[in-house]
Amino acid sequence: MSRIQPLTNPTGKAAELLGMVQKKMGRVPNMMSTLANSPAALEMYLTMSGLLGGSSLSAQDRERLALLAAKKNACGYCEKAHTAIGKHAGLSEQEISSAKDGVAQDARAQALLAFSAAVLEKKGHVSDSEFAAAKQAGLSDAEILDVVATTCLNIYTNYVNHVADPVVDF
């Protein structure tokens, strides 16, 4: 059972935000209705997620990073959610499975995953050699910063799910 119950009859800002989620996704996942207990927490997630949609990373890139973070942070909710979202974004079953292990066939995707893994494992304290490897792989400064931002967003949702323990609905 969830520690923090999803809102079932939201009002005010929570209702407005969940209405936007419903319109965009066609449903409201439990994680988001749980976050709606704090409209500020939900709005932060939605805003950051929306902004990252316009980043240098494709939807497939962002889903690979989400899958990696979910596995490294042992977030079953996010792993299930991003498996479904990754399929919708065009990732194959093999790409989804490999991303969870930090592996990609494409060199650029591999560089993104390797850098995100370093950020996750070292809590942002990546070494000069890890940074240089990302640059040598062709990642731009914008891509490196977008990897950090995407990784942080996924840490946020992983941790929310650890604390709130919503029922997995993916």
Image (tube, rainbow, N blue to C red):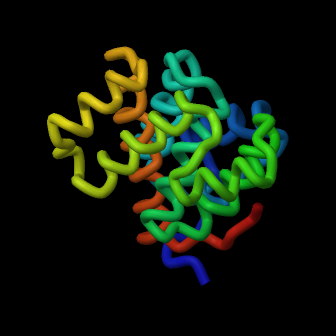
- Residue 166 position (above or below residue 22): below
In the rendered structure, the answer to whether residue 38 lies left or right of residue 24 reads: left
Find residue 89 and report its horizontal and vertical position in percent: 76, 35
Q: Residue at x 80, y 53 (%)?
A: 93
Q: Residue at x 37, y 43 (%)?
A: 152
Choose between 159 and 88: the one closer to the eye: 88
- Residue 10 position (above or below residue 23): below
Find residue 72 and report its horizontal and vertical position in percent: 44, 63
Choose between 39 and 124: the one closer to the eye: 124
Residue 61 shows in the view = yes
Choose between 18 and 127: the one closer to the eye: 127
Q: Residue at x 33, y 52 (%)?
A: 120
Quadrant for the C terminus, please.
Answer: bottom right
Q: Quadrant of residue 14?
A: top right
In the rendered structure, the answer to whether residue 103 lies left or right of residue 146 reads: right
- Residue 154 position (above or below residue 22): below
In the rendered structure, the answer to whether residue 13 lies left or right of residue 138 reads: right
Find residue 115 and report its horizontal and vertical position in percent: 37, 40
In the rendered structure, the answer to whether residue 98 lies left or right of residue 72 reads: right
